[in-house]
Image: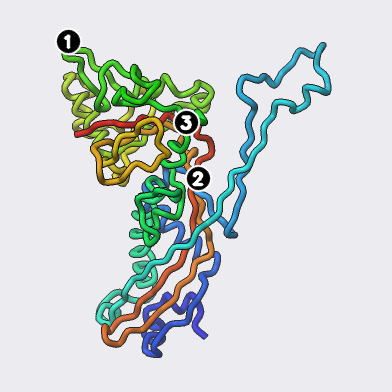
Amino acid sequence: MITNKDLLSKKKFIKAAALKALPDIELTPEEADKFLDYVIDQSFWKDNARIVKMNKAEKNLRFLDFASGTRFLKPAATFSSSDYQKEFTSDKIELASKKVRGCVVIYDDDLEDGIEGAAFADHLMKLVAIKVANEIDEAVWVSASATGTPYASTDIRSLWGGWRYALLNNTVLDNGVNLLDASNTIAGHTTDFTDAGGIAVRNAISGVWEIKFAKMMGTLPSKYKASGLGSLRFFCNDIVENDYIEALSARSTVLGDNAIMGNVALKYGKVPIASVPQMPTTYAAVDGTNDGLEEYGSGAYTDCILTHKENFIIGMQRILRMESQRVAADEATYMFYGMRFDVTIQNPEAAVFLANLTHG
């Protein structure tokens, strides 16, 4: 019997491949953790989201808070049993992993002429992890599983209600996320900004720059800033980041020069700007009655989100399977990977969503 360790050895791999196929295996918890660590290390979200490893297909994360506008402490003279945790709210965030599959082809020539021993296992796992990380980075943001989604059932982006969908879904009705409209066209948001358009716009008459990061900071409830501004992030496409840099450079300041040269980490005030290349820049306009399903690829708008870096949650299940198929005609072995993960948001109210942002 070939063990997991043997399977990831080049010599044992070649021997097993000659027998038409490798055994189907489930990675041990240690090997699964190593593979997930590879994926996490390659992902943008490693330092900008909360990564949760799941031992089972479902996991509950406890969410604790106090009801808005309430106070915990009471005057001792009036404190009574009616005040015991009366205003304390307890809820749970449910993670339910969904399975996805992928395949990597390993050619005989690459095995015979390439890397040896443990390096083979390392190379194979990193190769798959890079591809997996890139696709997860996109899926956690753009995916939409509701009726009307622009994604086909054969697309993994149809499996989850991604972070964008979760923030925008029923926004007007439920008043969850703090919504701002960069275009000043959504009902109730027609005066959000003096100058509609991009992240930084210079008024044609006054010459004053309006940087929309400032309004986003002012819109986020103060209680979500209490843990420190350094834990917050402005999440946006790198094109939006570049627009901000260009605006800084036009002001001819030291800050602008440093931003252009990349001498300092880009921030607005004390809040880091997190550049997310996988965030689309081709959304149709959010109109205020949407359910978060704007067509991806048919518009000219993008988004910017301000929230705590751990408000976004990715749950990755440790149960991973590897299966193989020998194809003699190709002189290759096809390795199939199966993994499970889920995405969710802890608290939509702790985010500011800037919609209809122009760019470039």
Q: Residue furthest bottom?
A: 19
Question: Residues under labels 1 and 2: Cα distance?
Answer: 44 Å
Residue 58 in the image, given as x and y percentages of width and height: 59, 55
Q: Which one is earlier in the sequence, the residue at label 1 or at label 2?
A: 1
Residue occupying the point 56% across, 50% down? 95
Give the spatial CA distance, label 2 vs label 3. Answer: 14 Å
Q: Nearer the viewer, residue 180 or 320?
A: 180
Q: Is residue 310 left or right of residue 239?
A: right
Query: Does label 3 or label 1 sit earlier along the sequence?
Result: 3
From what the image shows, is residue 99 above or below residue 286? below
- Mark 2, Cα crowd under 10 Å, few <14 / some 14-19 / many 20+, is many
Under circle 3, the secondary element is loop
**Quadrant of the image for the C terminus?**
top left
Amino acid of disc 2: Thr
Q: Which residue is mark 2?
A: 344
- Residue at horizontal 18 percent and vertical 24 percent from the top: 249
Task: Give the x, y percent position of residue 245.
Answer: 22, 29
Amino acid carrying mark 3 in the image: Val
Measured as percent of width and height from the top left, residue 265 is found at: 31, 33
Which residue is labeled 1 in the image? 205
